[in-house]
Structures are given as structure tokens and as C-alpha cells.
Amino acid sequence: MTVPASSANIGPGFDCLGVAIDLPFHLDVGEPQELATELDQHHPATTSFREAGGSGPLFAETHIPPGKGLGFSGAARVAGLAAASLQRSGAIRYPELLTKAGSLEGHFDNVAASIYGSITATNNHTVVRLHCPPGLSIVTWIPEHKTSTNLSRNRLPSSVSFDDAVKAVGRSSVLVAAIANGDLDAMRIACQDDLHQPTRLNDAPDSAQAITFALEHGACAAWLSGSGPTVAAFVPSELAETVSLAFPNSGHSKILEVAPYGISIS
């Protein structure tokens, strides 16, 4: 079984907009593939697999770096729950999977993207899948340090002003419409956030610089991926190398693609 990574909190889409990325998490039950390693009992794939009634050893291989804001735990939990469902009933019930994975993860945006692929807009149990505009790659900048999602979330303000809330709703609505219509200029204008990025970027000046550099070199949207510290950007494919080379030297970049599908079974 393979589940893609994800980048959530796209611009103003805090806890509701995510995109699946072609960094795979491979999970095997019982019979490992050549490069897979056995997972311990504390791994998020194992805990979700056991909680859903799965039995037997688990083996995994992944290219998703943990603690970087690329949905490692979400992809692992989706894989564990889906594997248990297949083992017990021979089928994956996607609405049930979303509910369980979102509950374990604490929010639905990452797991929805990993389950369904492409770009997803979520409101708790409701998911709408969007197609990525053609000709766009995802370029990521990944610094060496990690971020604790729980610690980062606990530092966010408990309330925002009415004006900031209205701005967020407007930007998020325009961003979704722009993605659906392939309006790259509108994507660039709407992909701004006042809810969580300012607080988080205060502690990550290199990430703030990476967002600025991406936009200056041709990205049509750039954001702090999840709780960071990774920065992700939608970039016209012909400019992907240029954006990749523009990022700060304190991290490394990857030119990736949107994963058009979520869970795949072999």
C-alpha cells in the first residue's frame, strides 16, 4: 500500500486546504518489500493499525521526512488504518477512514489529501477534491530543524479579530475558486495568511525568507507547509528549477509534483 505525503494550511486555508505530494509512504503487512524496515509499536502507522484491529508485523519505506510539515504522521496513520480495514473486511470505507484518521491526527486537512489525492478542501467530514491547474509543480524548501506541531499550535492566538476572520474567509474562497479555474494571478494574490503564519514565521525567519524568494522568482503561490518549517510553492514547471535555486542555503529544495491519487494498493 502506498499513501502520498501532504502539504496543508495552503495560504489562508488553515486546517482546511491541503495538497497531496508525490513523496510516498509504503506500508506492507507481514511480507516486507526489499528496502522496507519493521516498524516498532510506537510508530503512528502501527498504533493506528492496532487500534483498528489489525494484526501482524508492519514494514515501511518512506521518503517523507518526519517533523517537517509534510504530513508524515497523517500519511502513516492513513496507511495503518487502511491496511487494517483491508485485512479485516477486504475493503476500504473512505468516509469511515477519513473520520478515524482525522480524529487521530487532530485535524482533517492532511489526512484528506493523503486519502483522496490532488488538492482537497475539507470541513470536518466533508471533502471536496480539486484538480491542480495544469503545468504546475510543487517546489519545497526543507530546512534541517524540525517543528513540533503540538507546540507550534499551542502558541497560536485563541481568537482573532472580526476583520481578520473576514479576510481569511475571503482569501480562502478566492484561492479555491482560482485553483478550480486555473487563475494563477488570483492564486498569488489570495495565498496570504494572517491567522497562523505570522506567529510561526516569527520563529522561522529563514522560512519567511524562502516564501519571499519563491514569489520573487515566479511562484504563483507559496506558504508555510503545515506548521513548518518547510515552505511549499506552486510553481509553473518551466520555472521550478529557478525557484529551487533561489531558496536560502540553510535548507535543501525538492522539485515535486502533485500526487493525483491518494491511497494505492498493490
Image (cartoon, rainbow, N blue to C red):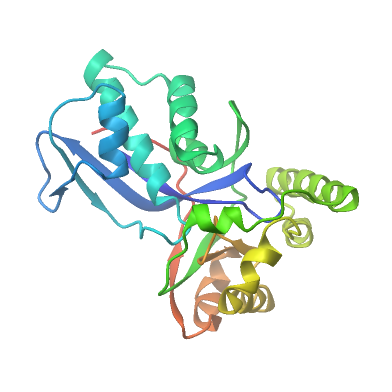
Above or below, 89 relative to 67:
above
In percent of the image, x 32 and y 42: which residue is there?
44
Residue 90 in view (yes/no): yes
Above or below, comparing residue 42 to residue 150 in the picture: above
Residue 197 coordinates in the image, percent (x, y): 67, 62
Tell me the residue at 22%/21% (across/down): 87
Q: Would you say residue 135 is visible in this rendering?
A: no
Give the left or right position of residue 186, taking residue 50 as reference.
Answer: right
In the displayed structure, does residue 83 sit left or right of residue 218? left
Residue 97 falls in image quadrant? top left
How far across and how far down the image is residue 247, in percent? 53, 80
Extreme top residue here? 89
Residue in view at x 11 percent, y 33 percent: 30
Residue farthest along the bottom direction in this orientation: 249
Look at the image and tell me in which quarter the C terminus lies.
top left
Question: In this rendering, would 133 be left or right of 147?
Answer: right
Q: Classify 155 as above or below 122.
A: below
Residue sitting at x 33%, y 28% = 82
- Residue 115 image point, x, y percent: 44, 35
Residue 77, position as x, y percentages in the image: 36, 38
Q: Which quadrant of the figure contains the N terminus? A: top left
Nearer to us in this view, 211 or 177: 211
Total tally of numbered discs in the picture: 0
